[in-house]
Image (cartoon, grey):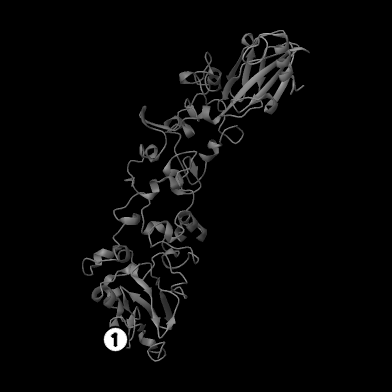
Amino acid sequence: MLRKFKHSHMIFLALFFGLAFMATGMLGAADFQLEATGGSNYIDLKWTNVSADSYEIYRDTDSIMELNNSTLVDIVYNQSTYRDIEVQSDTTYYYQILAIISDNEENLSNVASATVFFKQPHGDYAENPEACAECHQAHTADGQQLLAETDVNDVCFDCHTSEGPGRDVATQFTRGGSNHPVAVQQCSSCHDGHFSPLDDPALLEVTVSGSVYHTGGGTENCLACHSNFAFDYSGAHNSGQVTPKDAMIACSGCHEPHGSELQWLLKSYPYNAGQSTTIEGNDFCLTCHQNAGQGSDNEWNGEDTYNQGHSSNVYDCNSCHEPHAAPYADYLLRSYYQNYSSKSHSYNSNDYNTCFTLDCHSSGSVLFDGEGHFYDAYQERYLHNIHLKKADAICKECHRPHGEISAENPNLEHLVGFPAGTVSEVVYNGVSEGGPYFQAQSGGGYCLLSCHSRNHDETNSVYSNVYYAPESVVTVEKSVYE
């Protein structure tokens, strides 16, 4: 039973009769000692037998215990030990026992604490050696180092299976797409089973040829074997944004560490028709690359469906980017000049090898193409040539390589878009088109823009706002404002 008011009553009686009490206010408390020892999913209690009629066991997670606000775990009789199993791993508990000696006498023990270590077999072996028996056998071991199984992996798979208490790793290794070759590498190559999950999440410690390479997670764990990747340590792909808290390995932001249904241990594919994946595969990269505010101003901004232009079923992200490291900014495999604020030199096709080396475009056809590719047949002008060579513009001032957005290009054509800060809207005859604007027409189109503070208008021969394809000269008006 709970005795909420008895302590103050006893103190009153003690003062009245001049009895000498301990600081705790309990008779003989110095002789009533409690010890607590943490185990795997339990805490063992042991106390001094003070010949009490009963013992009330109280538990709290606050070191300053107040019995009235603590949990009454149990009331026991004629014993001085108790195992509390209603506890959780990685939690420290505080205990105090009230010994009921008689109706007029009770003793209160000291406060004792203990921490429940993680589920067997991983924990504090120095204080809890019994956990060792989960993996080792002292006299009849089947494997080296007194292992209970003939192989390290089999010891791990005793628990880490679909039927076991641990994470199902055994099934992950049997996935059909790709997996780490555990026949050659053992679980102990990446994990140290003697670590405590409290201090070393996922028990990570990678060893190479028996020597410790790296401890504590991080990309370095993977690079112990995958040294052929010149990983960009300074890039965003080595940041905490792609580091699961339970593993602490940046690589695991994109890869499964044990096995995957896909190639290269990938969690998901970027879209690629050649791999028979679906358009939803774009979500893999877009998990992080959602909008222009999260990275460069070349990124898709999330406004329209990401199925335009360079996200077609011909190319995937890897066509232009190397996610581990690349010689150019934004993980680009080839050059793509992006300094739109102040171009320091004239046009050079080598500045745009991302555009010119994938059988997509060629410098010659882009600059001089009379077949309707940005050609003004009315004034017989090659407009790419004018923009890139005469005006020193760059590709990204007029194009979004990852796809158009409707705010800038309502018909979502030609990858036309204006991510550069040098481009803004222009008002014509008091009419605003609501932002950087491109309107495609049959065989042509027009722009309402201000580029580097120079307007597209009919009075400026370089920045005239209308262009035509040859076959539509007679069908497209010269100006939308005439």
Residue 33 picture location, percent across and down:
62, 12
Residue 19, quarter of picture: top right
Is 73 placed above or below 215 here?
A: above
In which quarter of the view is residue 455 placed?
A: bottom left
User: Percent from the top left, x then y, of residue 359?
Assistant: 33, 66
Say which residue appears at 28% left-offset and 75% top-offset. 387
List the residue tagged with mark 1: 380
Residue nearest the viewer, comparing 444 with 117: 117
Whether residue 466 is situated above or below residue 403 in the rendered picture? below
| Place of residue 101 in the rendered image (x, y in percent of width and height, measured from the top left) | 74, 11
Instruction: Judge by depth and name the residue closer to the eye, 363 or 272.
Output: 363
User: Which amino acid is tagged 1?
Assistant: Glu
Circle 1: element type: loop
Q: Is residue 356 left or right of residue 69?
A: left
Taking 133 as reference, is 336 left or right?
A: left
Residue at horizontal 44 percent and vertical 56 percent from the top: 289
Q: How many numbered callouts?
A: 1
Residue 97 visible: yes
Left or right placement of residue 307 versus residue 375 in this view: right
Q: Is residue 332 visible?
A: no
Q: Is residue 453 above or below residue 153?
A: below
Query: Residue 370's x, y, as percent?
Result: 31, 81
Quadrant, the C terminus:
bottom left
- The correct choice, above or below, for 365 with respect to 232 in the image is below
Determine the residue positioned at 46% across, 35% down. 182
Q: Quadrant of the N terminus?
A: top right
| Image point (30%, 59%), residue name | 334
Comparing 93 with 406, the one in front is 93
* Few, some or many residues within 10 Å of mark 1 (<14, 14–19, 20+): few
| Lateral position of residue 433 relative to residue 97, left or right | left
